[in-house]
Image: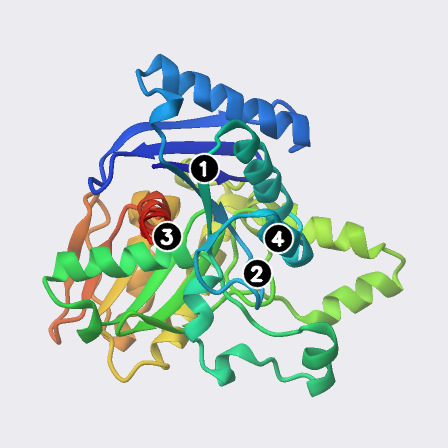
Amino acid sequence: MLVLNAGSATLKATVLDMPSTDPIFDQTVGWSSDGTEPAVGQAIDDALAAMADAGIAVESVHAVGHRVVHGGERFTAPTLIDDAALVALDEVAGLAPIHDPIAIMAIRAARARLPVLHVAAFDTAFHATLPEAAVRYPVPDRWGTEHGIRRFGFHGLSVAWSTRAAATALDRPVDELRLVVAHLGGGCSVTAVDAGRSVDTSMGLTPLEGLMMGTRSGSIDPGIVFRLMRAGLPPDEIERALDHESGLRGVGGTQDMRDLLAREARGEDPARLAIEMFVRRAAAAIAAASTTLDRLDALVFTGGIGQHATSVRARICARLRGVGVPEPPATETGEGVTARGKEGLAVVVVHAREDVVIAEAALELVGR
């Protein structure tokens, strides 16, 4: 099974010999330009050539799974890709203009090069179980019916894997667990998971809502946008700034948490402030998500920052002592359970494996 994860700047290609979850090939290829169709096709050619160099014949690939960020209301489960499905994907691409168009280009390019079954798996699909109170915005009803304004949620593939991995680490069935999963990376979100079902999440109509992120602002006062527009800033410029020039980069000058931590240690105030704001907002979102569960069995960290930035993880947990979250050692670097509280509440660290979730979805549909 070949899994292709097309991002805004890179294509990650992973090959798994199912049912094993150990990758036999895993490589990230950068775009030769900013996500144009020829660049996407070239990246796939480069990935296939690297596979061949690694001794994996392209003819041995039985199916290809693709990660697609936004499926809208149309795609709430993994889907076999045919021409009609591609047309429907084009129709929802505007909901995630930074992510979906590149993923769709990658699907088209891959189908042209690999005449096998292709399957799309959606980050929004895991959140199809959200209750209406979590889906609706407190805005005029006609905005929903006429303009599709509602909450979707993202990082669902990561949350699905984290839920399974946490159950394994805790040696308990998924349907017994109440979890809050914090996916902290370039994009950040928090999801409350009740017996394997998403019941609350921090991202909404777009991946811009919620936590402070690498280059995204997360939730801000909507009045800021109106004020800037009245001051003459074009909407496209505001959107670009909120998506690409805000978050850790906007406050600390970079989205690289490792660099920020090093600069904080040298006494640089912008880095210190960026980390403090990041920790504060992540902890607040985790606490809010926990109120949607009748109990909390574990707080699960995943994503690049969630897994590797141990001191940031410890600071977030320290802010949550009041709700019973134990503080893991600031130097703890492993996966699995890193701390347990007096009431049994655990802190669990999970290495993100969206590729496995995508490959399993592809295998199931191909088998069917």
Give whichever of discs 4 and 1 has the lower sequence position. Answer: 1
Mark nearer the viewer, 4 or 1: 4
Label 3: state its secondary structure: helix
Which label lies toward us, 2 or 4? 4
- Residue 39 falls left or right of residue 293: right
Q: What element carries label 1?
A: strand
Q: State how far apart marks 1 and 2 are (Cα).
A: 27 Å
Mark nearer the viewer, 3 or 1: 3
Q: Farthest top residue?
A: 53
Q: Residue 337 versus residue 255: which sits nearer the camera?
A: 337
Q: What residue type is labelled 3?
A: Leu
Residue 314 point in image, percent of width and height: 28, 55
* Whether residue 143 is visible: yes
Q: Name the residue under label 3.
A: 365
> In terms of sequence position, does the residue under pointer 3 or pointer 1 come before the other?
1
At 60% across and 56% down in the image, what residue appears? 217
- Mark 4 residue type: Ala
Spatial separation of the CA atoms under disc 4 and disc 3: 17 Å
The residue labelled by disc 1 is: 4
- Along the line of sight, which residue is nearer the eye, 221 or 2? 2
